[in-house]
């Protein structure tokens, strides 16, 4: 029996407006242009568009003659003149079990009957999205209810915001409320990228009975491939909180101590952020003490533990009954491809129903974070060709038609995995991840002890090292870490600035005699000694083109390990200075064809700021450390310590041809979802 708090509000007042036309033209033009420009940091790309969306929505609100303010309005229905047969209800209230009320915008067909519901939950302001509602309008025309919902404590919704903490139970309540809506047929799906993607997993973990399917895009499945990576804290949370989250919290509190909008907040933050990133101790800054005190709890819980259960769903795959369509990009934040592949395999193995196990799908494109668009084909400095674009809205509608309406539209006949293979720049269907036909191939680290910089003597070789081959070493100084000047970007970016430093070891193959496809998880097995009890290793594989340019083949966060976590992310084991330890680093995913004449390159260093907090190297508690010490790092590669890079090679001969070619049509013509 459904509780009374699932009963939706049905009051509405009809209002028509022409301002929506102007707003959609203004923002739509901006967004199309911005997505064709050079890649931005995910934060920049999302929020530069969001600012104009906010302006557009303000224009809509002010142009509606006599329209009351959002706070004073219960539920308003707006028939959009530019979209016949669609009704938009604003400020729809969603009561939660604890009495808090969320608010949403509903797009629905202007027709009698009941329809499947699609839910989108966001901390970024659903009214901004509602100002340019491309997918909601298409879905409403297709016969769906689309609810755009502000999560607890954000924008129009009541309550206190604590990132991710309440999304499991709130997600359950929203899904079941949507199923009970007077215009719903009881079947509910969801979609969204990044935070709006993770909230879907969190809701699925609670197994709402009316949750039929979800499309979590570019999102994690566990805390320690997200808040932490390889045991190191993801320091760029500051870039999320300060310009994206705090301004609305100030607005809600009528606090004029800082900006209330993203653009001004970002401008204020930009000149001072490097100082904050380098500040010690990590918990010493009071920057977020008022608005996000839980941030300091995150920093003080570095181990994977029960404390993080609020942000983990991997233990719950066995409870989930709804098939999911998982979407990510090779250049996404590393939690994207890692989360998508772990989620795919977890659901295929453990999900509670045959439908969920058999129909869960995975697609990985060449995309950066939140960059899927039919017109966007350039990621970083490489254009991957017209096939790289994707009509994401069409994909969503095909999926929802099959899952929520039972249409036999062919999507269930496709193999479960679809990959974009860079280098060849083509799509390919596969039956599994990782690919069964992948053959692990070893490249040994070789050299005469002078592998620092790309001009050094470091080599990657199929031949194992000799008995007395000298080791390579470098000194890492945490007061002068590698600062990734590209951290506001992602994609196939030139690595020259990293490979010219003396604290970066570089190993490179000879030019390849034939094309080599690497698809799967790249793994490094290294023999390491240090003269301190702890430090970090940051590694990267690149594709060196014939002109000498070294390009990344996955996201900038991949390939990182805090060495105290080498035995597991749930335990800290310090190193004995001078002792040689075997170390394994994985979770570097790609699908890339290294073309004939190209070279494979492997980098090793010990920092990647500001992605991760530089290790103090003292062996003490990281969160409270104030003393930073240099460390001498030695990478051994002799007969007794054969450090190596292991790549998953895909046979490319006719006798081992690809099992599936992509049967999807050539580049789609309609614009894709861009959120």
Image (cartoon, grey):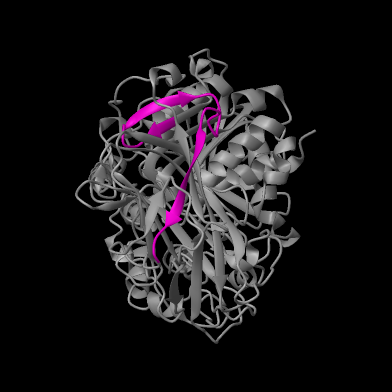
Q: Nearer the viewer, residue 557 or 106?
A: 557
Q: Is residue 137 visible?
A: no
Q: Quadrant of the N terminus?
A: top right
Horizontal side of 86 relative to 668 (left or right) equals: right
Horizontal side of 590 relative to 25 (left or right) equals: right
Which residue is at the far front?
Answer: 467
User: Does 102 appear above or below 76?
Assistant: below
Q: Quadrant of the C terminus?
A: top left
Residue 596 falls in image quadrant: top left
- Number of callouts: 0
Residue 152 at x, y = what percent? 60, 55
* Image point (46%, 65%), residue name: 236
User: Does 533 appear above or below 66?
Assistant: below
Q: Nearer the viewer, residue 298 or 581?
A: 581
User: Does 191 appear above or below 636?
Assistant: above
Residue 665 at x, y = what percent? 33, 19
Residue 243 falls in image quadrant: bottom left
Q: Is residue 463 visible?
A: yes
Which residue is at the far top?
Answer: 408
Q: Nearer the viewer, residue 85 or 157?
A: 157
Q: Nearer the viewer, residue 320 or 449?
A: 449
Residue 507 at x, y = what percent? 38, 57
**Which residues are drawn in magenta?**
419-448
* Image point (25%, 46%), residue name: 545
Residue 422: say if magenta: yes
Residue 256 at x, y = what percent? 43, 77
* Image point (31%, 55%), residue name: 40
User: Does 522 appear above or below 207?
Assistant: below
């Amino acid at each position: 029996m459904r509780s009374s708090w699932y009963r939706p509000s049905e009051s509405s007042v009809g209002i028509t407006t022409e301002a929506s036309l102007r707003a959609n033209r203004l923002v739509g033009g901006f967004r199309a242009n911005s997505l064709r420009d050079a890649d931005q940091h995910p934060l920049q790309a999302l929020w530069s568009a969001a600012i104009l969306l906010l302006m557009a929505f303000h224009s809509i609100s002010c142009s509606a003659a006599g329209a009351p303010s959002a706070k004073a309005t219960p539920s308003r229905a707006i028939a959009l003149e530019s979209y016949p047969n669609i009704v938009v209800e604003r400020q729809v209230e969603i009561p939660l079990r604890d009495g808090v009320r969320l608010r949403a915008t509903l797009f629905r067909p202007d027709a009698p009957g009941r329809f499947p519901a699609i839910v989108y939950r966001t901390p970024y302001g659903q009214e901004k999205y509602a100002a340019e509602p491309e997918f909601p309008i298409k879905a409403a025309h297709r016969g769906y209810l689309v609810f755009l919902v502000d999560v607890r404590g954000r924008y129009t919704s009541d309550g206190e915001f604590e990132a991710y903490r309440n999304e499991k139970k709130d997600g359950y309540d929203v899904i079941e409320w949507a199923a009970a809506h007077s215009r719903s047929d009881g079947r509910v799906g969801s979609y969204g990228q990044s935070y709006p993607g993770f909230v879907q997993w969190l809701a699925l973990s609670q197994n709402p009975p009316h949750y039929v399917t979800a499309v979590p895009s570019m999102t994690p499945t566990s805390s320690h491939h997200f808040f932490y990576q390889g045991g190191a804290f993801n320091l760029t949370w500051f870039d999320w909180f300060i310009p994206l989250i705090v301004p609305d919290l100030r607005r809600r509190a009528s606090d004029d101590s800082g900006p209330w909008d993203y653009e001004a907040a970002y401008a204020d933050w930009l000149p001072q952020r490097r100082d904050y990133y380098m500040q010690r101790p990590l918990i010493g800054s009071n920057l977020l003490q008022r608005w996000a005190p839980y941030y300091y709890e995150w920093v003080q819980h570095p181990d994977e533990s029960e404390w993080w259960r609020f942000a983990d769903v991997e233990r719950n795959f066995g409870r989930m009954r709804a098939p999911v369509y998982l979407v990510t990009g090779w250049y996404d934040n590393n939690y994207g491809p890692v989360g998508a592949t772990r989620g795919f395999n977890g659901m295929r193995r453990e999900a509670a129903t045959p439908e969920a196990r058999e129909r869960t799908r995975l697609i990985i494109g060449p995309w950066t974070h939140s960059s899927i668009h039919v017109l966007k084909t350039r990621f970083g400095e490489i254009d991957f060709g017209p096939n790289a674009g994707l009509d994401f809205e069409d994909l969503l509608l095909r999926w929802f038609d099959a899952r929520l309406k039972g249409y036999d539209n062919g999507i269930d006949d496709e193999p479960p995995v679809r990959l974009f293979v860079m280098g060849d720049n083509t799509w390919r269907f596969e039956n599994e991840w990782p690919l069964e036909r992948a053959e692990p191939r070893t490249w040994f680290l070789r050299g005469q002890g002078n592998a620092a910089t790309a001009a050094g003597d470091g080599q990657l070789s199929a031949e194992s090292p000799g008995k007395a081959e000298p080791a390579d070493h470098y000194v890492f100084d945490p007061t002068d870490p590698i600062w990734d000047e590209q951290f506001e970007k992602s994609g196939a970016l030139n690595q020259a600035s990293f490979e010219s430093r003396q604290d970066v070891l570089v190993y490179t193959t000879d030019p390849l005699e034939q094309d080599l496809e690497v698809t799967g998880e790249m793994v490094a097995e290294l023999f390491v000694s240090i003269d301190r009890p702890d430090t970090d290793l940051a590694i990267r594989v690149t594709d060196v083109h014939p002109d000498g340019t070294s390009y990344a083949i996955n996201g900038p966060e991949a390939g990182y390990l805090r060495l105290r976590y080498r035995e597991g992310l749930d335990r800290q084991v310090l190193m004995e200075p001078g002792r040689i330890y075997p170390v394994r680093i994985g979770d570097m995913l790609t699908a890339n064809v290294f073309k004939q004449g190209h070279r494979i390159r492997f980098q090793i260093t010990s920092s990647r700021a500001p992605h991760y907090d530089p290790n103090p190297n003292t062996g003490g508690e990281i969160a409270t450390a104030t003393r930073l010490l240099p460390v001498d790092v030695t990478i051994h590669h002799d007969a007794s310590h054969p450090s190596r890079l292991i790549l998953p090679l895909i046979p490319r001969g006719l006798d081992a041809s690809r099992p599936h070619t992509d049967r999807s049509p050539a580049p789609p013509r309609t614009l894709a979802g861009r959120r």
